[in-house]
Image (cartoon, coloured by chain):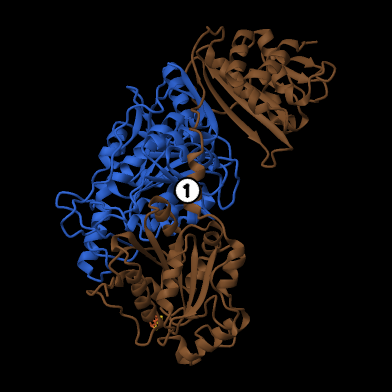
């Protein structure tokens, strides 16, 4: 029968190592499926199981401890036609736990062979995530304090569509591996073997004992019907096909001449839900329609539905350098939270500063030229406050004018929302 | 020209796509998340892949796998995430896997402040990997740089088969500005040199005259080996000290010997000025204002804005600094690059202006560094 083993680099495990049986079983599984070697990639983890890729004439990727599934995921998404086999020890299970859970949940068509020999063979036999508590290993008393994990149970609850538990020594291993490979979706095969180099010296574990222990456990042997669902890669491509092309960012053409010269700094001090950021964007669009450069820097709480919302806008006929605002030309105070957030700024206001202030918001002492707006009496709802406030600017011809504002609203909104926003811009009164 | 109005993160996403990136994986983290959000809109309709990893280690791991399959790949994160990526970055360096990594820096250390900027990862990007071999780090100052340097980053990653970082900053990433760009404009996207088939393929053998091994993707008709272990040209483990040293020398010189070709910078030199301001990143914008203002006042200074930070463009720095008495290094951290400048210019008087309080360094603060007041 055809073999995929690398004759130049025969398996070099310790005599009697369970990994050797698994290498041969994997070879037989490949042969049974008559796979082309260039269609197979073995992604190997770290430790003695990490030597696997070397012994086969297939594509190979060998990376960092516990991360084999991450490379395998990238490879399979990039080249869905490849058969991707991951070999990982029980050490990799522990350190790469998050990746195992994610692979089970994702159900990408990878086959994970867990070469489970209950210890870290390569580093001297320390306890791993599957070491029984009552066995003496190279970790002193520490493994007595921890409970071994049953990776098949973990896989089932994490949503794996295929899991199997077996012995490295059973005759049917090649078939079991083949079924795992044939399964369309993530398959995990937990293969118990012995590590004569480290583990069995102290534990005396034999293939017979493995057989007996497996017999006592509830069998896990393949497709997990209750978790059955679509394979991730195919599902991804199905969904991706349905996505509409991304719309490029808005592009604004110069249509008006700006009456402003130099740099204009505007700060909107608002709160969550007042659409402060949108209003800031509209000022910028308005500036752009008049050939100005614009920048917008925003600040809001991570908990977006409460707290301050602040937008800092700079419009300038020249390229804008420093993005900080120290002495605003216009300050809009429409929410107490925003004002509180930037209290210090009020000290810098001068008589030339225009302050647009909501009647229900208090501000610190300042020298600015103030206009108070009664939003509630004018029936302007909170979500329209910021827009109404910048409409005041347009009415005054300060920084932006009504033409620029209307053009900006048309760039930002469509249909009903556009109509409503034009109405707000129109109806706001300054007294 | 009609102007776009976009932020640095959007520009990075559009730049990546226009450079041929068709694979992105990331994990949500402020202030880098909107790159992921943009890639999720951009890539699937183009037949590309955009994934959310279970963590940053997985995200960059997906990228490394996809890159080995031949795709142009990118991930984006911030301080806490880039820290997790460290082992995978070493893998990409030592095993020559092209990958573009965006670090939208936020104020650290550690979790720090998610929504405050800083340039605190500048030395981390250079040295935050085991083995200490060089990487390429580019630093944008504005949205336009985000777009164009990201495109360059892809070409460099392909050409040199190495990780290339964009050291962005929250205040560029999340500040929108008007920008004159051609999103799908002409760009000569480079592809990693491909090996010719037929010959026995040695995945880590560099042809004579080249310092970078030719590439074949995993999945090709020819079998390809990739390994994070110390390897010879054939991709198998080696213990031969000669081969090991030779490879390390090659990994180092492939970047350091070609730095001239990818030294990105801007200079504003004023005759008669005695002081050179040297800076990078968002701080360059305030420095530019100082330059303009001092020029107007008739008391000019000169300015060097570095956009390639690593490998250090030593030749450029020496040549530019030569005529100046005083060098003022301005950084949005406690002093990371200034040590390099002191090393490169041992005879110059070097002043450091730094700040790490979450605010941008003001032109006034830079000026006081210039005048010593
Ligand atoms: S140390 Fe254990 S696992 Fe490693 S090769 Fe030897 S027997 Fe096998």
Identify the image quadrant of residue A387.
Answer: top right
Residue A420, x across and y down, in percent: 71, 17
Using residue A346 as the reference point, say whether residue A177 is left or right of it: left
Disc 1 target residue: B25
Residue at 60% over, 23% down: A281
Vertical order, A194 against B94 (above or below) = below
Relative horizontal placement of residue B10, taking residue B215 as reference (left or right): right
- Viewer-proximal residue among A73 and B107: A73
- The answer to whether B306 is drawn above or below residue B66 in the figure is above
The answer to whether A126 is drawn above or below residue A101 in the figure is below
**Left or right, A398 with reference to B37:** right
**Residue A330 appears in the picture as rendered:** no
Chain on which label 1 sits: B
Count of labels in the image: 1
| Image quarter of the N terminus of chain B | top left
The spot of residue B86 in percent (x, y) is 44, 56
Q: Secondary structure at mark 1?
A: strand
The residue drawn where x is 47% and y is 60% is A184
Q: Is residue A310 left or right of residue A171?
A: right
Q: Is mark 1 within 8 Å of ligand 1?
A: no
* Residue A8 horizontal/vertical position (percent): 22, 74
Q: Circle 1: is it few (<14), some (14-19), or many (20+) Cα within 10 Å?
A: many
| Residue A430 in the image: above or below residue A244 | above
Residue closest to the eye, B50 or A127: B50
Taking the spot 64% from the left edge, 34% from the top edge, the residue there is A299
Q: Position of residue A386 (x, y in %)?
A: 71, 22
**The colour assigned to chain B within the rendered structure:** blue
Q: Nearer the viewer, residue A81 or A415?
A: A81
Q: Quadrant of ligand 1?
A: bottom left
One can see residue B21 in this view: yes
Chain identifier, colour brown: A
């Amino acid at each position: 029968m055809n073999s995929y083993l690398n004759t130049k680099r025969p398996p070099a495990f310790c005599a009697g190592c369970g990994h050797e049986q698994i290498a041969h079983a994997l070879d037989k599984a490949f042969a049974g499926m008559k796979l082309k070697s260039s269609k197979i990639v073995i992604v190997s983890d770290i430790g003695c199981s990490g030597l696997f890729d070397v012994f086969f004439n297939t594509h190979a990727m060998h990376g960092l401890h516990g991360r084999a599934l991450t490379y395998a995921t990238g490879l399979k998404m990039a080249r869905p036609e490849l058969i991707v086999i991951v070999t990982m020890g029980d050490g990799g299970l522990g350190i790469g736990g998050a990746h195992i859970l994610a692979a089970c949940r994702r159900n990408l068509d990878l086959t994970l062979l867990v070469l489970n020999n209950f210890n870290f063979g390569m580093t001297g036999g320390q306890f791993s995530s599957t070491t029984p508590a009552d066995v003496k290993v190279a970790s002193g008393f520490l493994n007595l304090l921890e409970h071994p994990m049953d990776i098949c149970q973990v896989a089932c609850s994490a949503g794996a569509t295929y899991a199997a538990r077996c012995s490295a020594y059973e005759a049917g291993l090649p078939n079991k591996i083949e079924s795992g490979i044939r399964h369309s979706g993530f398959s995990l095969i937990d293969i118990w073997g012995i590590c004569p180099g480290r583990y069995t010296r102290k534990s005396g574990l034999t293939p017979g004992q493995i057989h007996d222990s497996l017999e006592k456990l509830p069998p896990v042997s393949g497709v997990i019907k209750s978790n059955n669902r679509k394979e991730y890669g195919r599902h991804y491509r199905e969904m991706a096909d349905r996505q509409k092309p991304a719309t490029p960012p808005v592009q604004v053409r110069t249509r008006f001449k700006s009456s402003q010269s130099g740099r204009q700094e505007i700060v909107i001090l608002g709160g969550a839900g007042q659409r402060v950021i949108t209003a800031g964007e509209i000022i910028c669009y308005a500036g752009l329609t008049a050939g100005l450069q614009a920048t917008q820097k925003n600040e809001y709480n991570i908990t977006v539905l409460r707290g301050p919302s602040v937008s800092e806008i700079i419009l300038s006929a020249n390229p804008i350098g420093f993005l900080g605002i120290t002495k605003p030309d216009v300050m809009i105070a429409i929410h107490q939270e925003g004002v509180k957030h930037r209290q210090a700024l009020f000290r810098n206001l001068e008589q030339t500063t225009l302050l647009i202030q909501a009647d229900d918001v208090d501000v610190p002492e300042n020298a600015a030229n103030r206009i108070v707006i009664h939003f509630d009496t004018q029936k302007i709802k909170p979500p329209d406050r910021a827009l109404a406030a910048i409409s005041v600017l347009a009415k005054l011809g300060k920084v932006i004018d009504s033409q620029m504002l209307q053009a900006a609203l048309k760039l930002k909104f469509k249909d009903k929302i556009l109509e409503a926003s034009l109405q707000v811009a129109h109806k706001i009164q300054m007294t | 020209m009609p102007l776009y109005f976009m932020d640095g993160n959007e520009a990075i996403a559009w730049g990546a796509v226009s450079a041929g990136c068709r694979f992105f994986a990331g994990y949500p983290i402020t202030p880098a998340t909107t790159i992921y959000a943009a890639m999720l809109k951009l890539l699937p309709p183009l037949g590309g892949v955009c994934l959310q990893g279970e963590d940053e280690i997985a995200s960059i791991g997906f990228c490394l796998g996809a890159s080995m399959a031949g795709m142009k790949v990118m991930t984006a994160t911030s301080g806490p995430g880039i820290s997790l990526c460290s082992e995978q970055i070493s893998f990409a360096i030592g095993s020559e896997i092209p990958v573009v990594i965006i670090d939208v820096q936020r104020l650290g250390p550690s979790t720090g402040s998610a929504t405050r900027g800083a340039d605190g990862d500048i030395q981390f990007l250079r040295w935050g990997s085991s083995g200490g071999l060089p990487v390429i780090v580019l630093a944008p100052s504005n949205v336009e740089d985000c777009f164009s340097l990201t495109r360059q980053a892809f070409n460099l990653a392909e050409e040199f088969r190495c990780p290339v970082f964009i050291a962005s900053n929250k205040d560029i990433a999340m500040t929108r500005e008007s920008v004159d760009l051609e999103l799908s404009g002409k760009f000569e996207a480079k592809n990693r040199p491909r090996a010719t088939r037929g010959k026995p393929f040695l995945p880590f053998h560099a042809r004579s005259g080249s310092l970078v091994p030719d590439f074949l993707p995993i999945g090709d008709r020819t079998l390809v080996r990739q390994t994070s272990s110390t390897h010879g040209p054939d991709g198998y483990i080696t213990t031969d000290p000669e081969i090991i040293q030779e490879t390390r020398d090659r990994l180092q010189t492939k970047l350091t010997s070609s730095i001239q070709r990818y030294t990105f910078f801007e200079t504003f030199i004023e005759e008669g000025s005695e002081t050179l301001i040297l800076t990078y990143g968002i701080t360059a914008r305030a420095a530019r204002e100082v330059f303009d203002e001092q020029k107007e006042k008739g008391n000019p200074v000169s300015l060097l804005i570095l956009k390639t930070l690593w490998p250090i463009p030593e030749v450029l720095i020496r040549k530019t600094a030569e005529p100046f008495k005083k060098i003022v290094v301005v950084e949005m951290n406690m002093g990371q690059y200034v040590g390099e400048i002191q090393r490169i210019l041992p005879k110059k008087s070097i002043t450091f202006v730094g700040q790490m309080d979450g605010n941008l360094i003001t032109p006034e603060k830079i000026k006081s560094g210039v005048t010593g007041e």
